[in-house]
Image (cartoon, helix red, strand yellow):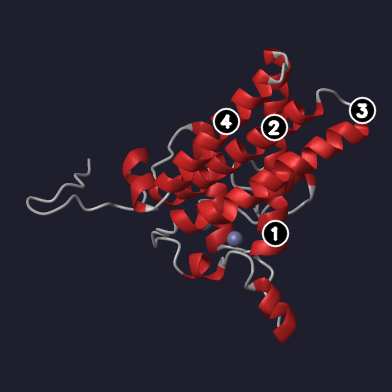
Amino acid sequence: MTDATQPSGTPAPIPGQMGPVAMIKAEGLTAVFCGVMALTVVYFAVALSLGIAPLLLVGVFAAGVFYWTFLEYLLHRFVLHWEPEQPVLKAVRKCFPGHRAHHNKPSRFREDGLHMLKFFTWPSLFGVFFFWGVFAYAGFEPALPLGLAFTAGIQIGYLLYEFTHSACHFMPMKWAYAAHLKRHHAIHHHRDETVNYGVTTSIWDVAFRTTWKGRPKAAA
Ligand SMILES: [Zn+2]
Ligand SMILES: [Zn+2]
């Protein structure tokens, strides 16, 4: 049993044993959580007002969540871990979120939620127009509500990613699938940065053969 509360002063957060609310606050995720949820409610409301069937809305939303898991894999592998040497490419790299500091000290709270919200909102709005065009081009109607539902799924997938990633570092995650994800991500940090890129799921590591192949630590 561990008591994170000190006799005096504020409660001391213990990485690996935090609750979800304390973790979200400590990581500075409150703004991005509220912002993305509000944007999702707006997307749903507009899509429904434009006449999309609720079941279709839910189905396309779920497809968007799944699509995010693929994006998450690609972004982590090819953007976050992209560390070019050339000055021009280094300047380009600075346009994207950094990841090295997190790898250098995974137990550090990020506290950059407002920045993340700003970085997230414009791609989300672009996503609505982009997928509106994709659905229209493919002949699926109503294209705009479909684009809204799909983008809503992507952004909720993103929220799940932020939550799961923080949880891997700061929450106990003892139950079966959560324990698997925590171990999967710990290997990415502490054994080999070129494997186990998936955070909300490990299926894309399996699909692209980037799963850790080493022996389990406990093996004799
Ligand atoms: Zn991490
Ligand atoms: Zn990484």
Disc number at residue 201?
none
Q: Badge 1: how crowded within 10 Å, few (<14), some, or many (20+)?
A: some
Q: What element carries label 1?
A: helix
* Snapshot quadrant of residue 91: bottom right
Q: Is mark 4 on a helix, strand or loop?
A: helix
Verify CB contact (< 8 Å) between mark 1 and mark 3.
no
> Residue 81, how many percent across, how many down?
66, 66
- The residue that label 4 is drawn on is 42
* Snapshot quadrant of residue 152: top right
Q: Nearer the viewer, mark 1 or mark 2?
A: 2
The quadrant of the rendered image in which ligand 2 is seen is bottom right
Q: Which amino acid does label 1 sit on?
A: Arg
Q: Is mark 3 on a helix, strand or loop?
A: loop
* Residue in the image at 64% along x and 69% along y: 95
Q: Earlier in the sequence, mark 3 or mark 2?
A: 3
Q: Earlier in the sequence, mark 1 or mark 2?
A: 1
- The residue that label 1 is drawn on is 77
Front residue of 87 and 128: 128
Q: How far apart are marks 1 and 2 (CA)?
A: 27 Å
- The residue that label 2 is drawn on is 148
Q: Would you say the beta carbon of the disc 4 residue lies within 8 angstroms of ligand 1?
A: no
> Residue 132, how many percent across, how many down?
79, 36
Front residue of 94 and 3: 94
Left or right position of 92 against 28: right
- The residue that label 3 is drawn on is 139
Q: How far apart are marks 2 and 4 (CA)?
A: 9 Å
Q: Is residue 171 above or below residue 144?
A: below
* Residue in the image at 7% along x and 50% along y: 7
Q: How far apart are marks 3 and 2 (CA)?
A: 16 Å
> Residue 153, how many percent across, how many down?
65, 33
